Image (cartoon, helix red, strand yellow):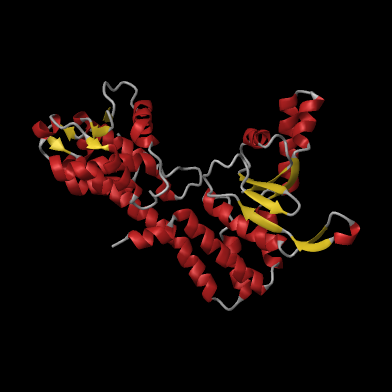
Amino acid sequence: MQITESFVEDILKMKFKEDYQRIYDSSLLLQYLDRKMKAVHGNSKTRRSLASIYAIYSILHFYQHDFYNQPDQYRDFGGYDYMRLFNYYRGLYGGRKLQNHALNSRVNGEFRNRFPTIPNDLIIIDNGKYLIHIDYLYVGNQDISEAAIQIIEKYIDLLMAKDHALIQTLQQMQALSDYSAKKNQINALLTEDAEARIFEIISYAILKNHYKNIKVYFGYSKETIQEEELQLFKTGRTNANDGGIDFVMRPVGRFFQVTEVNNYDKYLLDIDKVMHFPITFVIKTINRKQTVLREFQTYIEERANGMRVIRERYEKAIEEIITINELQEWTFELDDSDIDDLIRDIDIYYKLEMNMETEDESEE
């Protein structure tokens, strides 16, 4: 069986020498971890799976100290207390916002989906105590937990390096005196291959600084009309359950949803979530917005199958299409002060997204 990740193969070779492939082929735990770690490549659609991985890692962490290479003693063990495990993995890199679903059900569900013929769950759950089934900790007489721990730790190291790469890029931008170069570097981050959350954060920063230069006039009567700048607000983290709204605008009341071009059914679900209130779609594509809109309208027509009420319901809910092309164009229109604000906004919201301030404080 082919090992997916090169760093997993390197660790197994170092640990088990020429026997590494047999160990891998015989260990469902190693295979599961190997296939959960694609996020190191930066694919925007690939989940990091930190909840599932940390649920396993927290148990292995304490197991390594208490029962490594002691199978008989481990068979009599009743499991680790939930709060002990939960508090431990919440203290790991990127773990502060994780919930308890992985320990309670997610890992076992995912594990059975990948290996449907297994007789035992990966994690044994017993009245608030948790342990990994011994079947998955040994290959013959070989305890493979140490290798699993090293693989997870390497995965986290790679994610950390990847996460901090953008911060380093932003620091380099801030040091530049040539604002054309700053704009070029910002726009270079806006690609179809960009990570979804990085694209959302950069899009927000560009739109926030673009719209703040646009004036509108509001008042309850002619005598009370006042000039106001458009303000864009981010609703939460990029993976938040926000009901289909990524950004909101004051005072005009616009909704923005960041998405990708290849799934128009999701667009309709986003519209349904907000009861068909008009949405501006910010799309990670270099296709022209007219092309995207035409394809979207064609999809709506196919779904409606001639039913006018359905077609109009969705077409009227499309307020505007914004693509990478518009974002790049608007970046070049910003003045020097706005560009500095934009870079600062990316830095602030990216660190918030990654819990970087918290992580830095917790490292020893």
Give left or right: position of 188 versus 84: right
Give left or right: position of 192 versus 158: right
Residue sitting at 49 percent across and 66 percent down? 169
Q: Quadrant of residue 341?
A: bottom right
Looking at the image, is 172 positioned above or below residue 281?
Answer: below
How many numbered marks appear?
0
Residue sitting at 82 percent across and 62 percent down? 226
Give left or right: position of 280 versus 104: right
Please provide percent x and percent y for residue 278: 74, 41
Work out which quarter of the rendered image holds the N terminus and state it.
Answer: top left
Please provide percent x and percent y for residue 334: 69, 68
Work out which quarter of the rendered image holds the C terminus and state it.
Answer: bottom left
Which of the pair 164/350 is nearer the observer? 350
Residue sitting at 64 percent across and 35 percent down? 273
Is residue 45 in view? yes
Looking at the image, is 36 positioned above or below residue 10?
Answer: above
Looking at the image, is 321 positioned above or below residue 104?
Answer: below
Is residue 16 in view? no
Please provide percent x and percent y for residue 303: 71, 26
Farthest residue, direction right: 222
Give left or right: position of 232 versus 161: right
